[in-house]
Image (spheres, helix red, strand yellow):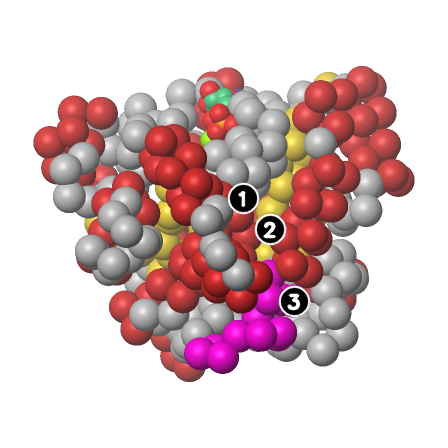
Amino acid sequence: MTLEKSHEGLMSRTRQQFQVPVSTVIVTVSGVGHEGISMKVIAVMNYKGGVGKTTLTANLGAEIANRGHKVLLIDLDPQANLTFSFYSVAQWREELRKDTTIMRWYEGDSPGRDVGLHELIVSPPIVNEQLDGTGGKLDLISSHLKLIDMDLRLAARLGGGTTLGESKRKFLELHGCLARALRHESFQEYDLVLIDCAPNFGLITKTAIVASDHVLVPAKADYLSTLGISYLDGNCHDLVAEYNDYVTHGQRDNVNETIETRFLGVVFTMVKIYAGKPIATQQYYMEDVRVNANMDVLGGTMRDSPKYFGDAGESGVPAVLRAPVTDDVVVEFRKLATEILDGIGGKAR
Ligand SMILES: Nc1ncnc2c1ncn2[C@@H]1O[C@H](COP(=O)(O)OP(=O)(O)OP(=O)(O)O)[C@@H](O)[C@H]1O
Ligand SMILES: [Mg+2]
C-alpha cells in the first residue's frame, strides 16, 4: 500500500495557499518511499493550545497505519503528549528519556551532529501489536520535556553572524536541519511522516514547517481558536519565502533545497453534534473561517467525544483503533483520514 503522487481535487485547490515564487520547485523531503513512491510529510500545527493537534496526529497515524501504510510520528512538543499517547510516563523515563528522544538530536553544537535522527526511532509495542497483520506500522520519535530550553538555545544560535552571507548560512542550517535529516535512507521506508508541533511558532516548529510538504491546522470552532488562522497563514508564507530566497541566492554548497510547503487546510475538532449537525455557535465560526480565512477547510471534522478522545494516551492505542468500527466517531474519522490522504496525493482503501 503506497501513497500515490497523482492527485487533483483538494491539492489543486490548496496549491495557491503559500504563494511561493513561480521558480520554486516542488520538493518532497525524502527520496523514495517503499514501492518507489515519495514519502509525504505533514506538520500538524496551530498556535492555539488544546485544539486537538495531538489527538488528531495520534489517531490519524494509527488509522493510516491500519490501512497498511508505514507511518512515522515525530513529537516536537516539549509537553510530549504524543509520546505519552503511546508510552506511559514510567516507560518513557526508563526506556526513552536518556538516549532516545528528539532532545538528543537538537542538542549539541548543531542538530544531528552527535546522533542521527533515524537512531531515535522507536516502535511503540502496544499499538503495533494491534496493527499485526495489516502490513502497516506506526513508529515514533519521542519528545522530551526539556525541549523547551532547546528551542530558546537554537534561536540564540541564529544571531552572531558577522556578514550577511554568514547569517543566511546559519538561518538555512538551522531551519533546514529536519528537512535534511529526513532525507536519510532510513526514512525511505515510510509512506507518511506526521509531525506534532507545539502551540507556538518557535524555531523547532519552523524546522517542522520547512521539512513538511503540507501543514494541517486543527481548530476548535470558537472565537479564540479561529482567530490565529490568518496569522499562521502569513507567518508560514513569510518563512517559506525567506527560506527559498536564501536557498536561491548566495548559497554555494547547495545542501538545502527550495521548499513548497502547502496548507492542506483547517480541520475542525471537538465538533458538538446535535440533531445530526454542529451546534449553532460552532456552525457560525466554521462558516466564518470558510468564508474569511485564506485557507481551505476540510469537509471532514472530528466530533467532540470525551468518551473516546478525552482520555488521550492512557491505553497506548488511539481511539480510532479501539472504538467499535460502526461508531459514528470512527466512521467520521475514517472519512477525514481518507480526505487527508486524497489531499496529499494518497490512495486510501
Ligand atoms: N474530539 C475530541 N473530543 C473530546 N475531547 C478531545 C477531542 N480532541 C481532543 N480532546 C481532548 O482535549 C484535550 C486537548 O487535546 P490535544 O492535547 O489533542 O490538543 P493540542 O492541540 O495537542 O494541545 P496542545 O496545544 O497543548 O499541544 C485533551 O485532553 C484531549 O484528550
Ligand atoms: Mg499537543
Measured along the vertical axis of the image, is residue 324 above or below residue 121? above
Q: Residue furthest left?
A: 94
Give the residue at mark 3. 245
Give the residue at mark 1. 44
Q: Amino acid at mark 2?
A: Val
Q: Residue at x 19, y 45 (%)?
A: 100
Q: Residue at x 31, y 38 (%)?
A: 143
Q: How far apart, in angstroms, are the residues tagged by discs 1 and 2?
A: 6 Å
Q: Amino acid at mark 3?
A: Asp
Indicate which label's residue lies in the foreground, 3 or 2. Answer: 3
Residue 339 visible in the shown view: no
Identify the mark nearer the N-term, 3 or 2: 2
Residue 271 versus residue 296: which sits nearer the camera? 296
Measured along the vertical axis of the image, is residue 5 above or below residue 341? below
Q: Secondary structure at mark 3?
A: helix
Question: For this view, does 156 lie left or right of residue 201?
Answer: left
In the rendered image, residue 163, in percent from the top left (x then y), is placed at 53, 61
Look at the numbered discs 1 and 2 and tell me whether their residues touch, using CB distance below 8 Å. yes
Count the numbered circles shown. Answer: 3
In the rendered image, residue 333, in percent from the top left (x then y), is placed at 56, 41
Identify the mark nearer the N-term, 1 or 2: 1
Q: Amino acid at mark 1?
A: Val
Quadrant the N terminus occupies: bottom left
Q: How far apart, in angstroms, are the residues tagged by discs 3 and 1?
A: 25 Å
Q: Secondary structure at mark 1?
A: strand
Q: How far apart, in angstroms, are the residues tagged by discs 3 and 2?
A: 20 Å
Give the residue at mark 2. 215
Tell me which corner region of the image, top left, top right, bottom left or bottom right, holds residue 282.
top right
Q: Residue at x 32, y 47 (%)?
A: 106
The residue segment tinted magenta is: 243-254
